[in-house]
Image: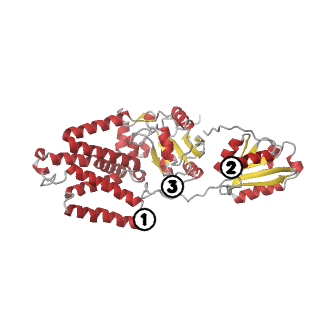
Amino acid sequence: MYKSVITKAVSAKLEENLQYLSQRLGVGTSFDILIRKFRIGRKQAAFVFVDGFANGDNLILIMRNLLDAQQEQIVPNTLDKVIMKLLPYGDITPVDELEEAIGELLSGPSLLFIDGEKKAIVVDIRQYPARSPEEPDIEKVTRGSQDGFVETLVFNVTLIRRRIRDPGLRTEIFRIGRRSLSEVALVYIEDIVNPSIVEKMKHKLATIDVDGLPMAEKSVEEFITGGTWNPFPLVRYTERPDVAAVHLLEGHVCLIVDTSPAVMIAPVTLFHHIQHAEEFRHNPIVGAYIRMVRAFGIFLSVFLVPIWLLLAKNQHILPESLAFIGPEEEPSIPLFIQFIFANIGLDLLRLASIHTPSPLATALGLVGAILIGQIAVDVGFFVPEVLLYIGLVAIGVFSTPSWELSLANRLVHLMLLVLTGLFGYIGLLGGLLLLMIKLLVSRSFGVPYLWPLIPFNFFALLTVILRKPVPMKRFRPAFLDTADADLAPPKKQKDE
């Protein structure tokens, strides 16, 4: 949580409070920090608000009520009477520290100071500039809801509450960053989640000490996961409210960072990153087929080229039926060097498409994939098989649901490619051993990254491989150690 070095209590003198706020907030220099003085009965008062955050209609309604108040309506116990009778709208919270009041103000709510009172009133009538919920580009589905998270934290929490109307749903707010005061919401279902996971997450959030979080959710992720050099994602991102709701009901926790449309889900395993909402929008057998095809594509994106390269360099071990593998003549440029250049070209093409205006992105892809590739083959820079297998790798990369996992797989792919090209069998086996060790030692908030494969859980692994029908999913994932392990509703007892 945000902790200020300065602790100054709200003064009973209005002008002293306003002078302090003016100095701290740069009133007069910053055009959007406004102070409006007026009277409530015979008492001097002032509203302090950020112009872009305050809802004008609600502010006018509150000001009208306060200006119409008579002296006898607010004395004695002015503060209590103003809160109970004269503030008709908004979340009302009294604060007695000026720095706490400033933190609230910069988050969007307005401040009301009354002369003679040693507390300020935080009036939450904020409104944020926000776009309407739209379907995320990365997590599109052919059927299903078309809404997605936006950059406004309150909207995102509301999208989850619309799907989970459980009174046990908790949304705890943290302010992180000495200067940015970024709002982070920890969301979980109290009577389902493992309390130790919640406490661990709260501790990690509370100990973040940094000036700001300019990269929002990514900065938070690096703090709570330890900021290691592990390329594999230890949290899952989603921009779909239905995906976040499913994970909350399973016993995960979600982190929502204001200004980001991506919600973090933790803890997770490797297999969470290869699942997609599309699988659950079809019949179970179709969903299982989609999941297996996707897993095959991910496998190709990592292992196809290193295995092909190994076989192409050792054609004497191939049977007659596989004699076509590898070039007929020894290329002037070693095959693994060609693959490295082709992979770099593929990544450059992806980066260029991100920075290219949408109407031109398709044309860029056609030029890069067809024109440049064909010319490279014609001049002898690439053998034709290189483009074929790089094309298959690209399809596997784009079929990976998790963008973070696809980038990690790219690094693993290049590592295996280089080791195989330099050291042959030993290089490939050594690379696979390093990969397995890394996955074995990886933990997501204490959860083994390869669960349910290691440690082995047959029935859970079956659920990962096959998309089971929803009525057959009887229990929540065992690795979460949830307080309520049963997914099915409790049986109703018959009246005696």
**Classed neighbour count for the residue bearing mark 2: other residues with Cα under 10 Å, few (<14), some (14–19), many (≥20):** some
Instruction: Indicate the amino acid at tag 1.
Output: Ser
Are discs 1 and 2 less than 8 Å apart at CB? Answer: no
> Would you say 120 lies left or right of 231 here?
right
Q: Nearer the viewer, residue 163 or 398?
A: 398
- Distance Cα–Cα, label 1 vs label 2: 41 Å
Q: Nearer the viewer, residue 220 or 70?
A: 220
Q: Nearer the viewer, mark 3 or mark 2?
A: 2
Residue 453 seen in render: no
Instruction: Indicate the amino acid at tag 2.
Output: Leu
> Would you say 345 lies left or right of 35 here?
left
Q: Nearer the viewer, mark 1 or mark 3?
A: 1
Quadrant showing the N terminus = top right
Tell me which numbered mark, 3 or 2, is placed earlier along the sequence. 2
Tell me the residue that label 3 is attached to.
148
Q: Residue at x 87, y 52 (%)?
A: 70
x, y percentage for residue 235?
Answer: 45, 42
Instruction: Indicate the amino acid at tag 3.
Output: Gly
Secondary structure category for the residue under label 3: loop
Tell me the quarter of the picture where residue 386 sits: bottom left
Are discs 1 and 3 less than 8 Å apart at CB? Answer: no
Residue 388: assigned label:
none
- Distance Cα–Cα, label 1 vs label 3: 20 Å
Tell me the residue that label 2 is attached to.
25
> Would you say 242 lies left or right of 372 here?
right
Tell me the quarter of the picture where residue 12 sits: top right
> Would you say 428 lies left or right of 221 here?
left
- Distance Cα–Cα, label 3 vs label 2: 35 Å
